[in-house]
């Protein structure tokens, strides 16, 4: 019996201890819940207090601005009153009592009418100097776009500064969302950035716009090439608020010969039938302009007949690329990228706009994910800057507009040769090859293969000017001696000749070489060990081929004026 009682007592003690433990746990949970609830309330209260403080600060700032404006108005009135009093004294007219001192606010509305009645207009005009009563310039309200900064123009390192600070330090997170919306999804308006709260979108829209060009005209060729005339409105560029004028330039979207993927083109041809270029394709190229007009005046180039207006900003060149990506549907994310190659072969000389080329290249490579080997820069031969293409532009592909193998002929058709002749040009090309990122001692973080340092020499075929077999042999000698490469195999790895049929444009004095002449020229170059290709002309029927670009709305206005 004693054992039973002992067991029962032990069991009761255990039960009581268990109940006590459960009660203690329940009390702990309740305490924790109360603490959490108190913390939430405190956080909410702190947030309300922060909002209230922010509203108070905004109200005080508004009051301060109103007070400053009132003070400016009073100072302006006092200045006018002083000038008027001096004018009255000079004209021997009794000065009203209200002008012996600073007029009271109540008398300000009646002071000026009294002056106008007592002062003869001719007396004031003769006695008061125009500089002393010069009125401020009239206020001209800005358009809805001109007072806003361009988001694409803000440097990447400064982009975070446009985002408002918050207690939770989410600026970097918001920055990643902003970059993804612009460069990965291709939004055209800040209101389309759905990741941002409405209040943040409205705040950004007050001062910024994305920077999307307006497509004024769109001309489609029978071969699928599409030429766009885009306009950039007058706006404010960069983080420092630089004002830029409006500009219109042309860019050309060039699909491969198989047609367009996801873009239907039903183009009426001469015989009245309709062709459909909507078959599947893999890649396309965009020809980008770097200047509005051109200052080089090459005699065979249509762009050279247009007056040089200004350089394009880096964001304006980026906007052309993003416009092409929208045409290709590359921002949908549901299929592989179609726009794979960028060529700076549009309007203007890219190296004359070198300051804006570097940020443009950085955006293409780091934000839009184009490899340097997929970007080609074409230059007419601005020799001092050619080595910088290898060092500052990540070693993008280089094309040189050569078009003649001796200085006399090249100076006739390309005036830039008078400043940088072939000897200077070849020296700069040797330096480019030495500094290219594909070399072993390159410090570039972006890997570029040796085959990507090959230079393309562009050679337009002009009938009876530069298309003879002797011209072809002279071209080979120039490249061998100029690049100082005697081995045929090595020469083929660093030089490539691209023959371009001349594309006739209104007012030109040249004709294109016939097919047999071009074939003989190509054979003569190839027999010396150089790779030589004949470029297929694309978009000729819409003046979108090489050497045909020009802001066509300007050309139309010139025609109308002449008529």
Image (spheres, rainbow, N blue to C red):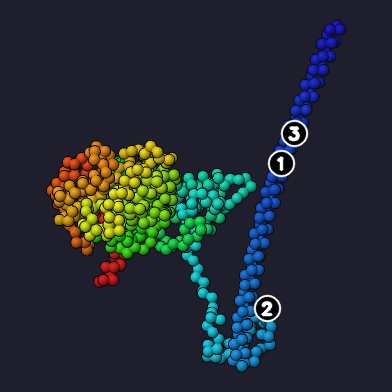
Q: Eyeballing the image, is 415 above or below 275?
A: below
Q: Eyeballing the image, is 293 above or below 197?
A: below
Identify the element where label 2 is drawn: helix
Name which residue lies at 27% across and 52% down: 423
- Of residues 15 and 280, the one nearer the viewer is 280
Residue underneath mark 1: 39
The image quadrant where one finds the N terminus is: top right
Identify the element where label 1 is drawn: helix
Residue underneath mark 3: 30
**x and y, in percent, of residue 201 in the image:** 54, 53
Name which residue lies at 63% across and 82% down: 82
Tell me the number on the disc at residue 105. Answer: 2
Tag in front: 1 or 2: 2
Q: Is residue 525 left or right of residue 561?
A: left
**x and y, in percent, of residue 192 in the image:** 48, 50
Q: Is residue 304 left or right of residue 211?
A: left
Q: CA distance from mark 3 to mark 1?
A: 14 Å
The image quadrant where one finds the C terminus is: bottom left
The quadrant in which residue 84 appears is bottom right
The crowd level at tag 1 (other Cα within 10 Å; few <14, some 14-19, many 20+) is: few
Q: Is residue 43 left or right of residue 412?
A: right
- Work out whether residue 430 can be spotted: yes
Tag in front: 2 or 3: 2
Name which residue lies at 27% across and 44% down: 484
**x and y, in percent, of residue 57 in the image:** 66, 58
The crowd level at tag 2 (other Cα within 10 Å; few <14, some 14-19, many 20+) is: few
Q: Earlier in the sequence, mark 2 or mark 3?
A: 3
Tag in front: 3 or 1: 1
Identify the element where label 3 is drawn: helix
Q: Earlier in the sequence, mark 1 or mark 2?
A: 1
Tell me the number on the disc at residue 423. Answer: none
Q: Which residue is outermost to the left? A: 516
């Amino acid at each position: 019996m004693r054992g039973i009682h002992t067991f029962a007592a032990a069991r009761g003690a255990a039960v009581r201890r268990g109940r006590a433990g459960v009660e203690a746990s329940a009390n702990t949970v309740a305490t924790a819940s109360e603490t959490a609830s108190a913390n939430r309330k405190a956080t909410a209260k702190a947030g309300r207090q922060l909002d209230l403080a922010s509203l108070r600060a905004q109200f005080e700032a508004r009051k301060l601005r109103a007070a400053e404006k009132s003070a400016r108005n009073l100072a302006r009135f006092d200045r006018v009153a002083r000038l008027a009093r001096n004018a009255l004294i000079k004209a021997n007219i009794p000065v009203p009592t209200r002008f012996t001192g600073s007029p009271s606010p109540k008398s300000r509305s009646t002071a000026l009418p009294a002056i106008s009645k007592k002062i003869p207009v001719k007396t004031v005009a003769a006695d008061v100097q125009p500089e002393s009563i010069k009125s401020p310039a009239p206020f001209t309200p800005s358009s809805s776009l001109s007072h806003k900064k361009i988001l694409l123009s803000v440097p990447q390192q400064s982009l975070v500064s446009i985002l408002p600070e918050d207690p939770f330090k989410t600026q970097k997170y918001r920055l990643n969302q902003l970059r993804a919306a612009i460069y990965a999804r291709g939004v055209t308006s800040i209101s389309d950035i759905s990741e941002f709260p409405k209040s943040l979108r409205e705040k950004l829209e007050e001062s910024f716009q994305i920077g999307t060009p307006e497509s004024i005209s769109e001309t489609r060729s029978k071969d699928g090439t599409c030429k766009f005339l885009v306009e950039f409105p007058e706006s404010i560029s960069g983080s420092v608020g630089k004002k830029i004028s409006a500009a219109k330039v042309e860019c050309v979207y060039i699909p491969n010969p198989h047609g367009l993927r996801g873009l239907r083109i039903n183009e009426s041809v001469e015989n009245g039938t309709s062709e459909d270029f909507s078959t599947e394709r893999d890649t396309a190229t965009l020809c980008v302009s770097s200047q509005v007009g051109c200052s080089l005046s090459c005699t065979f180039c249509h762009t050279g007949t247009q007056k040089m207006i200004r350089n394009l900003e880096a964001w304006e060149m980026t906007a052309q690329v993003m416009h092409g990506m929208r045409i290709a549907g590359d921002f949908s994310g549901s299929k592989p990228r179609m726009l794979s190659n960028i060529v700076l072969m549009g309007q203007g000389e890219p190296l004359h706009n070198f300051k804006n080329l570097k940020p443009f290249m950085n955006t293409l490579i780091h934000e839009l994910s184009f490899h340097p080997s997929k970007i080609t820069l074409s230059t007419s031969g601005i020799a001092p800057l050619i080595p910088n293409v290898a060092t500052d532009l990540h070693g993008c592909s280089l094309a040189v507009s050569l078009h003649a193998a001796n200085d006399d002929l090249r100076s006739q058709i390309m005036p830039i040769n008078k400043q940088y002749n072939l000897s200077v040009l070849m020296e700069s090309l040797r330096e480019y090859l030495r500094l290219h990122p594909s070399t072993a001692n390159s410090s570039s973080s972006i890997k570029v293969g040796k085959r990507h340092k090959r230079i393309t020499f562009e050679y337009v075929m002009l009938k009876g000017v530069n298309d003879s077999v002797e011209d072809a042999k002279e071209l080979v000698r120039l490249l061998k001696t100029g690049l100082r490469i005697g081995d045929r195999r090595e020469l083929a790895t660093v030089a490539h000749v691209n023959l371009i049929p001349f594309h006739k444009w209104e007012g030109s004095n040249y004709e294109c070489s016939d097919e047999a002449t071009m074939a003989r020229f190509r054979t003569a170059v190839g027999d010396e060990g150089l790779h030589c290709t004949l470029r297929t002309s694309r978009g000729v029927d819409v003046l979108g081929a090489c050497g045909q670009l020009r802001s066509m709305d300007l050309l139309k206005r010139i025609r109308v004026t002449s008529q």
